[in-house]
Amino acid sequence: MSSVKATKPDAFKERLAMWQDLLREKTQNLAKAVDEWAARRDLRASFSFRGFLGESVLNPVADAYELLVRLRQLTSRIKVLHMAGSVSRPADLTPKAPLFVGGATSLCLHVLRKLGVTHILNCTEDLPAPSEEELGDLKWRRLALPDHENQDLSETLKSALQVIAEAEEAGGKVLVHCHEGKSRSVSVCLAYLIFRQTPLADALMYVKSKRPIARPNAGFLRQLMAFELEALGTNSTLPEELLKGKPVLSSRVGRGS
């Protein structure tokens, strides 16, 4: 029985030694490849792999794991820098509402945390959700909303108002975004301002002062006017051109009668 117990540590040591030798060989090959890649491009290394690659490795198994952790941290920082290069700051609608509104390029989680955003409402059908690891303590929800003039807003607005009200009650802020930050996301923000007793015309003027491209489609505006009438008992007077829908081309255009 004691001989069986004695062989287990020996087997473990042999297996560990095998992995040590294998990783030492792999790290030496990788160090050589890194040096050759940099030499071909006439680059000087901005950081050292000493202690992780090549002859300087002391404990290949532990050092390989440490290298993996550091590379993950490095790639995470590179991703933040990449996103920051193409990010646009969302329009801040506070203090009238705990809202930020923007397009797809406003979805930089690092920036959003700096702004105090706690919730994200994605009003598109196709923009992907960030991973749970990326979101961390941020709460994300999709309100799939096609940007069509005949799209019914009622259920979407009901869900959105509930999320925003809960966030506000908890002291949080909400980013509402779509692709351009022009129609769908703006419509949701306008609905919340109406819910907070701001007339539609005033709400639209305020949002446009913060985000000049804001322009909900005509169908959404008509539904917002109906929501305003229900919530406030009156209707705003909006410029006629805002309520004109896009022309619908007949399927017979260009065909002989």
Image (cartoon, rainbow, N blue to C red):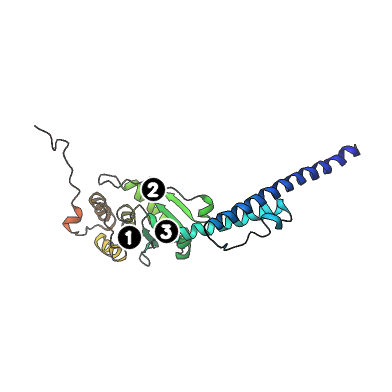
Outermost residue on the bottom side: it is 95
> Toward the viewer: 29 or 59?
29
* Inter-mark Cα distance, 1 to 3: 13 Å
Q: Position of residue 52 (x, y in %)?
A: 67, 56
Quarter occupied by residue 4: top right
Of the residues shown, which amino acid type is indicated by label 1?
Leu
> Toward the viewer: 126 or 244?
126
- One can see residue 172 in this view: no
* Disc 1 and disc 3 in contact, CB within 8 angstroms: no
Tell which circle, 3 or 2, labels the residue nearer the N-terminal end: 2
**SS at circle 1:** helix
Question: What residue is shown at x 70% (from left), y 50% (from top)?
Answer: 24
Name the residue tied to disc 2.
143
> Toward the viewer: 113 or 171?
113
Of the residues shown, which amino acid type is indicated by label 2?
Leu
Tell which circle, 2 or 1, labels the residue nearer the N-terminal end: 2
Name the residue tied to disc 1.
193
Q: Is residue 71 left or right of residue 178?
A: right
Q: Residues within 10 Å of mark 2 (few under 14, many from 20)?
A: some
Quarter occupied by residue 233: bottom left
State whether residue 58 is above or below residue 250. Answer: below
Question: What residue is shown at x 65% (from left), y 50% (from top)?
Answer: 29
Tell which circle, 1 or 3, labels the residue nearer the N-terminal end: 3
Mark 1 or 3, closer to the camera: 3
Quarter of the image with the C terminus is top left
Q: Position of residue 12 (x, y in %)?
A: 79, 43
Name the residue tied to disc 3.
174
